[in-house]
Image (tube, rainbow, N blue to C red):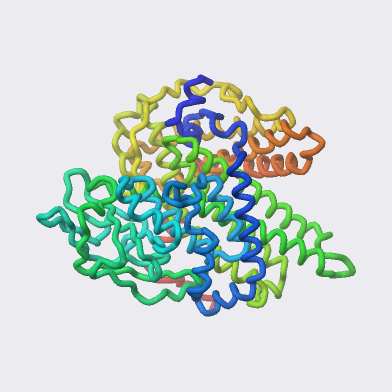
Amino acid sequence: MSHETETRTDASIAKGLFLGDIREGHIFPFPGLKGEERETVRMILESIDRFMAPKEKEFRQFDHEGVQPSEYIEELKALGLFSLIIPPEYDGLGLSNSAYSRVLQQTSRYDASTSLTIGAHSSIGLKALLLFGSDAQKTKYLPRLATGEMIAAFCLTESGSGSDAASIKTRATKNGDGSFTLNGEKIWITNGGTAEFFTVFAATDSDAGKITAFIVERSFSGVSSGPKEDKMGIRASCTTTVRFDDVRVPAECVLGEEGKGFKVAMAVLNNGRTGLGGGCVGAMKRLIELSIAQATARKQFGKSISEFQLIKEKIGSMAAICFASESVVSVVGHLIDSGVEDFSVEAAMSKVFVSEALWQVADEALQISGGNGFMKEYPYERVVRDSRINRIFEGTNEILRLYVGLSGMKDAGDVLKDMAKSVSGIFNDPIKGFGVLSSYASKKIGQYTPIGRQALSQVHPALSQEAAMVEQGVAKLAQGVESVLRAHGKGIIGQQLLTKRLADSAIELFVNMCVLSRVTSMLNERGIGAVDTEVRIAKYLVHASHQKVSGYLKALNDNRDHDLCALADSVIGAGGYSWDVV
């Protein structure tokens, strides 16, 4: 492995997997919070616990009524929870992505709607201002955003253009004086009814691009919000439509460059995924605690149900996937904080894995609780409802799987010289309006060599078998990618089920690398005898992933996809299920 591969800030770890490359840089040693920031985060966590722990009945009432009282929002402001990622020079706390994610983890132990109110403000609402704002824009708005005087919202989604962001209809027409006239409506906007600051994306006529990002204040004439949406979960958070009727937006409110709004939107979503990931991890940790208490206290057949293997299976797997989730979220936060230029695939992988892990943990926790779990007086049913949205917003997991798979194959297509004409250019916009794939430096794959050439060289010897399994998986993934590209050429864009299998394989392997790094660091710091449980977690996760990846890759050539799609066409044509036993 070359030193260049190890240290380049533009070399994507995740994309390397599709090439058969294992890029250990930025994963080993395992990242963690250090020094003064670590102490700051600990103090914030203690404050959150003191504030939120006594409010369980209130959170249940907020959920029932579908609202966070204004007094509660004022308390969040007083705690400084709207200032988390704003730099100190603008009166914020200036937390890193990793530290911010850890704070969202703590609020999510108690209430997902609270995390969403805070997260929509910081993760996406004001993030474009941080990333692309001018000094004048930051000076004007960030201090007011830090205090919560202005709450922020992110306005991208429209009716009929969910993941297809490039098809938005909201339009900004440029006027003679350089200002814009904004017209349109955005839907499902978190903080839509309470925000005073909106990051709005609108279609514009520009040689540089067709979408521009704008700062829009609620005080601008023509800005209005619809009624609060009645949602399945995260009910207390404020979700509304936001309308813009002949809103005059000054020229100085353009965020970034005119016509470059799509780049702004994707950068915001990629950066914001550590908040969502941290929130999922916090909810999982709380559910595991509740499940252990429930399983220990409940007696059946003269024993605590925690002694039964089927319950142990649930709690053990819940703990393992929470550990994996926390590991991958930590790595992605570190990638962003370290200035890595290309982390979009890793961020997408993290979002898919962690949101689905929470769904599994929430379902199992409710199951362990039995009938109690179905009752509103217990927290399980609310967490299940709250957690479902994570697989939908900030990019559906289906769209993100295609993004992961097609992004990885784009690099592989570039380096397979005999495939260049067949695949060149088709990856520039693999998911219309969602993922913008940059051009990356070409690299020869050469011939696939025996397993072991690309090695996880920094994994502790106690996990050598697991490291070898990951190495084998990476080599087989690269072979599968080449096979699929050779078989389908340009047609790969339409082979979504094959792309999904490649993406799922890469996700499992990336998560495995994060887990092996974390446990290796623990082994190096504390010794084998002190890390027995963590070693068991790593072994369980890697062996389980090895079976999954083997199945995914085998199904690239041995599947019944044609039959399944033909069945779907038949059912769709019939308008429903047409069989009956009567």
At 63% from the left edge and 35% from the top edge, which residue is drawn?
517
| Residue at the limit of the structure toward the left, as seen here | 176
Disc tally is: 0
Where is residue 37, by image quadrant?
Answer: top right
At 84% from the left edge and 65% from the top edge, which residue is drawn?
304
At 70% from the left edge and 59% from the top edge, which residue is drawn?
288
Q: Residue 562: in sight, yes or no?
A: no
Q: Residue 291: in sight, yes or no?
A: yes
Where is residue 341, by image quadrant?
Answer: top left
Q: Image height check: is 91 above or below 289?
A: above
Q: Position of residue 177 (x, y in %)?
A: 12, 55
Q: Position of residue 55 (x, y in %)?
A: 63, 71
Compare residues 297 and 575 and report the one nearer the observer: 297
Q: Image height check: is 98 above or below 360?
A: above
Give the left or right position of residue 42, taking residue 21 as reference.
right
Where is residue 53, by image quadrant?
Answer: bottom right
Q: Position of residue 129 (x, y in %)?
A: 36, 50
Give the left or right position of residue 238, taking residue 24 as reference.
left
Q: Position of residue 23 (x, y in %)?
A: 53, 29
Compare residues 19 and 32 and report the one nearer the observer: 32
At 33% from the left edge and 54% from the top edge, which residue is drawn?
140
Q: Image height check: is 405 above or below 351?
A: above
Compare residues 339 and 14 and report the one nearer the observer: 339
